[in-house]
Image: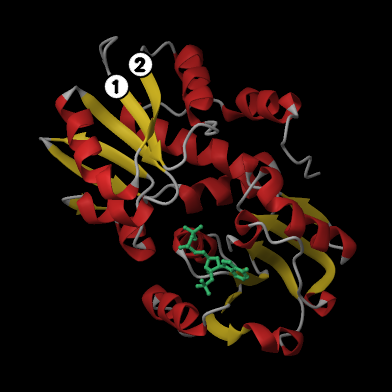
Amino acid sequence: MPTPTSRYAVFGHPISHSLSPRIHAAFAAQTGIALDYAAIDAPPERFAAILEAFAAAGGRGGNVTLPLKEAAFALCTQVSERARLAGAVNTLVRNDGQWHGDNTDGAGLVRDLTGRRGLDLRGRRALLLGAGGAARGVAPALLDAGILELVVVNRTPERADALVDALGQPKRAHSRYWNDLSNQGDFELIVNATSAGRNGSAGFSAPFTLVNSRTLAVDVNYGQVAVPFLAWARAGGCRTVVDGLGMLVEQAAESFKLWHGVRPDTGPVYEALRARGDNLVTAE
Ligand code: ATR
């Protein structure tokens, strides 16, 4: 049973807008587990030292967000298979004086889609846009969820090739060129895991021939960053359009379970964040 001084934190740069402290405080209140969960700003060059100081001060676990997920991977003594495939860690667990790394992003995405929204991913032809840390985090979970085929497209094609190679499923996962998207047919699932919206890109551009009457479009981002892709998905007639807020709450619940052995009820926490409005996109 954790003591009231059990310390957890999310590390990122910048971090002030992170919803993770709010989410974990809600989980803690719901489950009656006393914990302290902070947001810690860690410039990349100081992340290792900041994480060490956190451990020395009683830090038991952490979440890691942009741009530190690959650095966190490198700082772990052990990593889970899904973190190894991603080459990125979003969850740190302190064990025997060492950091163990996991990646709950993909499980969070699949849980949001199949659990909360009751969508069936099985048999869907899926297009994954992007091949960075976020894409590598979700790709294995999509394959595990029973999608028929995964086509990975990235601005820099070599990264898409590397992701597909790492997945090790040559019959189901393929890489294709972005400028050849119009020749790829249509998809029942399109996942945007690029950071284009984060860099201030005004629009998202891809052929509407990718969309069919069943297409579920998902952005792993939420808030303003997701706006360009979600607008494209609606304009293209996607049947269901989803942002990454549910995934955020679900990946947090997976982390919470790793630390505390209890899976919180994510429904009310998600609803509260969605109702808060602010800069969040209403996806449905
Ligand atoms: P993250 O951890 O969010 O995945 P990342 O590892 O830096 O961040 O990866 C960013 C992803 O968004 C990459 O797939 C990147 O494409 P490149 O590999 O070619 O860099 C993609 N991306 C970023 N800006 C983009 C843009 N304007 N158009 C298309 N893809 C973009």
Q: Which residue is mark 2?
A: 35
Q: Quadrant of the C terminus?
A: top right
Please report whichever mark, 2 or 1, sits nearer to the chain's N-terminal start: 1
| Number of the label disc, if any, that sits on residue 7 | 1
Residue shown at 35%/42% (left/top)? Answer: 91
The answer to whether 233 is drawn above or below residue 80 in the figure is: below
Name the disc covering residue 63, or none. Answer: none
Mark 2 vs 1: CB contact within 8 A: yes
In the picture, the quarter occupied by the N terminus is top left
Q: Secondary structure at mark 1?
A: strand
Q: Tell me which amino acid carries mark 2.
A: Leu
Residue density around tag 2, few if under 14, some if 14–19, many if 20 or more, within 10 Å: some
Asked whether residue 118 appears in the rendered view, the answer is: no
Q: Relative to residue 21, is residue 175 depicted above or below?
A: below
Residue at 43% x, 10% y is: 32
Q: Quadrant of residue 58?
A: top left
As displayed, is residue 39 above or below residue 140? above
